Amino acid sequence: MRFADVIGDKGLKERLIRMVEHKRLSHAILFREEPHGGGLAFALALGQYVNCRHRSDGDSCGICPTCNQFQKLIHPDLHFAFPVNSSRDVAESQKGRPISDHFLDNWRELVLNDPYFTEQDLYDAIGIDNKSGNISVHEARRIIERLQLRSFEADYKVMVIWLPEKMNQECSNKLLKLLEEPPTGTLFLLVSQAPEKLLATIRSRCQLIEIPPMSAEQHQSKPQEPLQEPVEYRDMLTGLIEAGISKKLIDTFAIWEALSDMGREKQKEFCIYSEKFIRKIYMTSQGLEQIAGIFDQEKSQIRDLASRIKPDFYEKALSAFDRTISAIESNTNSKLTFCDLSNRLLLYL
Ligand SMILES: [Zn+2]
């Protein structure tokens, strides 16, 4: 998940990004949220951001291999612990000691569908009926085991603990030990709705971050259409993409001219819009349409492009737009700048 896709306080996103950039990020962060408050979304965006290979413009790139695996919640250095209980679906041999690992598929499906779920949504998803979940000492042992491994490829191993207040005493003591002597390169992200129920010693080891309550509009997690949807930009970008796919250089000329004639601010706006749109196509091609922030009227076009664009296009295209933005900012000749961009897109498709 990128910060841009997190519904919630913009100021907080900027603060987290500054903490990373200024190397002031603690090894353990305790997010306090209201139920349905978006703490998990912030944690996932932060975990992805610290590990992204090409972060730029205050966000992760969303398309490097690391981002891709984080977005699908399958990165080998991304770990989860959340409250569970015994359920019908867990193998008989594991019945007495359920841990999060037994429910990872349900968890991924739930989070990818809507990261703003409630505690009850989780229990429904993992099928523990009317029992409430807890985080047991078996879970703590599993956490220790996983964090003792060297990280596979990421800079940080990310351990997300959702609702740590559900840890029992024994588990809390083990976690405290870990927080006191953290394995190198580990980032603990605790998302709590009742941090006062945690051991004071655990709280004091974490950097507390309050998630401001969401406004009524923010609660509607569906992306809202902007008042003036930039159809013009969309037509120009998809025109360039279609010309690239069909290798019809001539079709790019009119678009290239129109782009060169726009003012610099609009040119930059077009590039930023295009980067967002290309990420949406990429996410759709990766089966992540649900969390790509796609508007209804873009959907069919994005799906169609996702099925026709080559997988290696996205990363190269984003770099081409980054270069174009830098060129615009340094007042390079517009015609040359957009000629270069059109050619590159044509080449990459
Ligand atoms: Zn990335």
Image: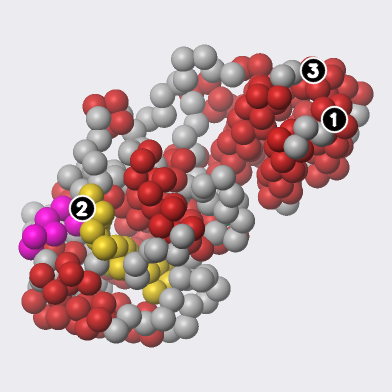
Q: Residue furthest right?
A: 250
Instruction: Give me the C-alpha separation between circle 3 and circle 1.
Output: 11 Å
Q: Label 1, secondary structure: give it.
A: loop
Q: Name the residue under label 1.
A: 333
Residue drawn at (43%, 72%) of the image:
157
Earlier-in-chain disc, 3 versus 2? 2
Query: Looking at the image, is 105 positioned above or below residue 157?
Result: above
Q: Which amino acid does label 3 sit on?
A: Asp
Q: Mark 2 points at which residue?
A: 32
Q: Residue at x 46, y 41 (%)?
A: 4
Q: In which quarter of the image is the C terminus?
A: top right
Q: How crowded is mark 1: few (under 14 residues within 10 Å), some or many (20 or more)?
A: few
**Residue 81 percent location from the top left of the image:** 27, 67
Is label 3 in a helix, a strand or a loop? helix
Q: Earlier in the sequence, mark 3 or mark 1?
A: 3
Residue nearest the viewer, comparing 23 with 42: 23
Q: Distance between the residues labelled 2 and 1?
A: 49 Å
- Residue that appears at 34% across and 67% down: 26
Say whether residue 293 is magenta: no
Q: What stretch is highlighted in magenta?
A: 192-197
Residue 196: say if magenta: yes
Q: Which mark is residue 261?
A: 3
